[in-house]
Image: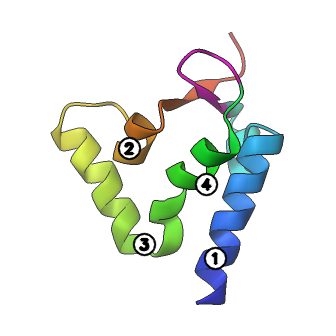
Amino acid sequence: YVVPVLIIVYCSVLEKIKGATVGKALMFLRVVSRNGYPISWSQAIFRNLSKIFWVPIIFDWAIGRLLKYNDRVLGIFTKTVVANEVG
């Protein structure tokens, strides 16, 4: 149970402080609030809760697609988006 907690901490801290995890930074993506500002700590933590285990993240993504959103459900609830850094 330590690894899932470390994953949430890793993703939350990097997305809050740097705006992106290492993978997102390599793809020139960053996480921002829908208003364009950096995300808050609560947004960072809540949007990464589904990463505790692999099954919740699949449902998070699939439900978002089924509801015709181009986002994960937790991204919708936290009012965050993953945006291109360039342009």
80 horizontally vs 87: left or right: left
36 horizontally vs 17: left or right: left
Instruction: Tell me the tag on residue 45.
Output: 4
Question: The disc labelled 1 sits on which kind of residue?
Answer: Val
Secondary structure, mark 2, is loop
Question: The disc labelled 2 sits on which kind of residue?
Answer: Arg
- Distance, label 1 to label 3, CA atoms, is 13 Å
The crowding category of the residue bearing disc 2, from other C-alpha atoms within 10 Å (few below 14, some 14 to 19, many at least 20), is many
Which one is closest to the eye, mark 4 or mark 3? Answer: 4
- Distance, label 3 to label 2, CA atoms, is 14 Å
Q: Are the residues at dot 4 and dot 2 in contact (C-beta closer than 8 Å)?
A: no
Q: Percent x, y for residue 12? A: 68, 54
The crowding category of the residue bearing disc 1, from other C-alpha atoms within 10 Å (few below 14, some 14 to 19, many at least 20), is few
Which residue lies under the disc numbered 3?
A: 54
Which residue lies under the disc numbered 2?
A: 72
Q: Which comes sooner in the sequence, label 1 or label 4?
A: 1
- The image quarter in which residue 26 lies: top right
* Residue in the picture at 57% in, 15% down: 35
Q: Percent x, y for residue 15? A: 72, 45
Secondary structure, mark 3, is helix
Question: The disc labelled 4 sits on which kind of residue?
Answer: Ile
* Residue in the picture at 45% in, 62% down: 50
Which residue lies under the disc numbered 1?
A: 5
- Distance, label 2 to label 1, CA atoms, is 20 Å
- Distance, label 4 to label 3, CA atoms, is 17 Å
Front in this rendered view, residue 38 or 24 = 38
Magenta span has 65?
no
The crowding category of the residue bearing disc 4, from other C-alpha atoms within 10 Å (few below 14, some 14 to 19, many at least 20), is some
30 horizontally vs 59: left or right: right
- Give the magenta part as a residue range: 30-37
